[in-house]
Amino acid sequence: MTNVSRTLAEFAVGLRYESIPPEVIERAKDCLIDTVGACVYGSQLPWTQTVIGYATRNSAPGECSVFGTPVKVRAPFACLCNGASAHAFELDALVEPSVGIHPSAALAVPGLAPAQGRKLSGKALLSAYVAGFEVLYRIGHAANHSIEKVGFHSPGVVGVFGTAVVVGKLFGLDANKMVNAFGIAGSLSSGLMEFSSTGGMVKRLHLGRAAEGGFMAAVLARDGYTGPTGVLDGKFGMLNVFCRDAQPARLTQDLGSVWHVMKTKIKRYSCHSTAQVPVTLALDLKEKHRIVGDDVASINIAGGEKVVKQHAINEPCDITMMQYSVPFSVAVALHRDPLDPRTFSEATLADEKIRSLARTAQVELLKSAPGYSTSACRLTLTLKNGKTLTAEGHDFKGTPTMPLTRPELLEKFLKLTAHRDRRRAERLFSQLAAVEKDADLSALDFAL
């Protein structure tokens, strides 16, 4: 078997809770909390309800919660539903700098589902989450931002590997079986970028399928099924089939000494990651200069190559594309409150004032900040009185350099969950914030 597969497998299998730095544990808990909030909100949306209906009809009775609902199903169906609901409304956590992964759906969801069903401890969950994160990040980093350039959706392609680690560790796989879990997971990678044209709803499903597929890979490996040991770096491995100009050396770089969990980025607004900084800049200009959307004649956005090539959508056709569009998200921020996820609605999509302003947006490459997925942005607003306002930045509240405090995270969590039952939502938040003290996760109430 290849050294890469074995090195990653041995790291994942051997990682112990006691060897994980305290700050890494705290950041992992932030993502768990944020993921549950995103799932509870996402579970009520019609496209997620369709997935939940599918799972309910086809699953045998189970012990794993579909977060935000009273439904309990078997673990693979819970992974499918919760992965889809985590990504159902662009609320799930990412990493900064981006490497094309979604730790919420790929790691937190498949960690919580089987841990709950098997009555495992919070420490076991956190150990599995961190192990999965460190492996998943390195796979995404090694892909070198090329997966989506080829036409595949990166989180759907790489997410299965992170899930396989989390579930494999929770199920007690040894290193040999974990290598096989990688090998199986590689044949379950999927997700096409064609959703950026039409049919955007399917984008939500990619993350659910990644969680479901990674679960399958781990369980099959546990039961003796095998997969190719060169699935990551072999001739027809993931880095050579789904990628161009990959960097295989990154797969094991600084493994066990640099903790990429600390790069977790928690979103403030329910729009794509590339829109988070532009929206922040728009809000800053609104507050500083006391303007409203009706004062703005046109928008200019200078950002990274990814913004220019994938997110310069002036006329989104549905809610998914509205959230995927940087120009439209900026126009929304100038006219409404983007901190409220309910702002990104059919009514907003149909608002002619917002649509007209989004049409004016010019998107160009920010030459001072090279990099395919850089978060750096320069936003220029030309007002109807002829005045020009400009702001530039690369950060927002929620990134690793400006992390949300626990009270700020609670504020977001309650915004997503308290519409059901605030008291129960506050209790669940407190339990997740101290999950390492819990010896049996089966008692957690995710129904709210």
Image (tube, helix red, strand yellow):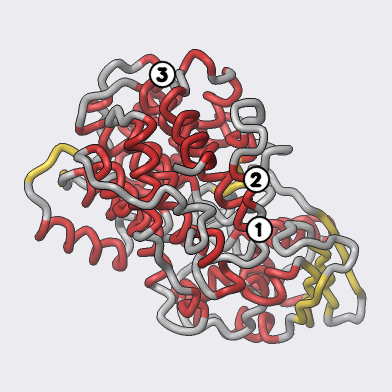
Q: Nearer the viewer, residue 107 or 363?
A: 107
State the image coordinates of residue 55 (x, y, percent, origin top left): 17, 57
Q: Where does residue 17 sit, x and y in percent of width and height?
A: 46, 18
The amino acid pointed to by label 3 is Glu
Tell me the quarter of the picture where residue 402 sits.
top right
**Mark 3 or mark 2, earlier in chain:** 2
| Residue at figure coordinates x 43%, y 25% from the top left | 127
Quick check: 165 left or right of 313?
left
Q: Can see residue 38?
A: no
Residue located beneath label 2 in the image: 250
| Disc number for residue 436 | 3
Helix, strand or loop at disc 3?
A: helix
Q: Are marks 2 and 1 in contact (CB under 8 Å)?
A: yes
| Residue 37 quadrant | top left
Q: Residue at x 77, y 75 (%)?
A: 295
Which residue is at the front of the view, 54 or 129? 129
Query: Is 249 drawn above or below residue 172 in the view shown?
Result: below
Residue type at numbered disc 1 = Asn
- Can residue 392 be seen here? The reply is yes
Question: Counting other residues with Cα less than 10 Å from the Cα at mark 1, is it few (<14), some (14-19), or many (20 or more)?
Answer: some
